[in-house]
Image (cartoon, rainbow, N blue to C red):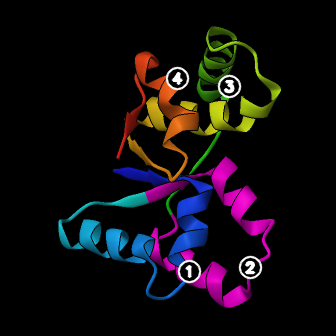
Amino acid sequence: MIQLDTNFLIGAVNKGSPLEAILKRWLLEGESLATSSIAWAEFLNGPVSKQHVWEMSNLIEGRIVPFGGAEAEKASELFNETGRKRTARFDCFIAATAICSGASLATQNRKDFAPFVAAGLRLA
């Protein structure tokens, strides 16, 4: 399972983009795609069209991974262990969701998520 970060969701709606090609390759390889409820909310904040939302919902087959208690605990660990940077708060939420569900994370902001690799995050 690969969870898509917000920037992958946004990039994939651009026809012919490099991200669209990567997603198509993963699907051909049999990967399942999902996103965290946090990244999904960021995506929906847009601007995106109803068509984009429909396309992405179909791409991930409705797999929106919830953010619950275990994810909240992991996110707070990540936040505290990586310097308590306010700008990284949502990245902690997204990383925690991927870690707790055992998924890899696809992001264009690899630098932002690199500090979480030591805590178990796998980058796709």
Q: Are marks 2 and 1 in contact (CB under 8 Å)?
A: yes
User: Residue 108's spot in the image, x, y percent?
Assistant: 51, 53
Q: How many marks?
A: 4
| Residue at 63% across, 14% down | 82
6 sits left or right of 120 in the view: right
| Among numbered discs 2 and 1, the one appearing first in the sequence | 1
Determine whether the residue tagged by mark 1 lies in a helix, strand or loop: loop
User: Residue 102's spot in the image, x, y percent?
Assistant: 37, 35
Q: Amino acid at mark 3?
A: Ala
| Residue at 48% across, 38% down | 98
| Among numbered discs 2 and 4, the one appearing first in the sequence | 2
Q: Which mark is residue 72?
A: 3
Q: Nearer the viewer, residue 109 or 9?
A: 109
| Among numbered discs 4 and 1, the one appearing first in the sequence | 1
Q: Amino acid at mark 4?
A: Pro
| Residue at 32% across, 60% down | 32
| Among numbered discs 3 and 1, the one appearing first in the sequence | 1
Q: Are marks 4 and 1 in contact (CB under 8 Å)?
A: no
| Residue at 40% across, 22% down | 120
Residue picked out by circle 2: 48
Q: Are marks 2 and 4 in contact (CB under 8 Å)?
A: no
Residue picked out by circle 1: 13
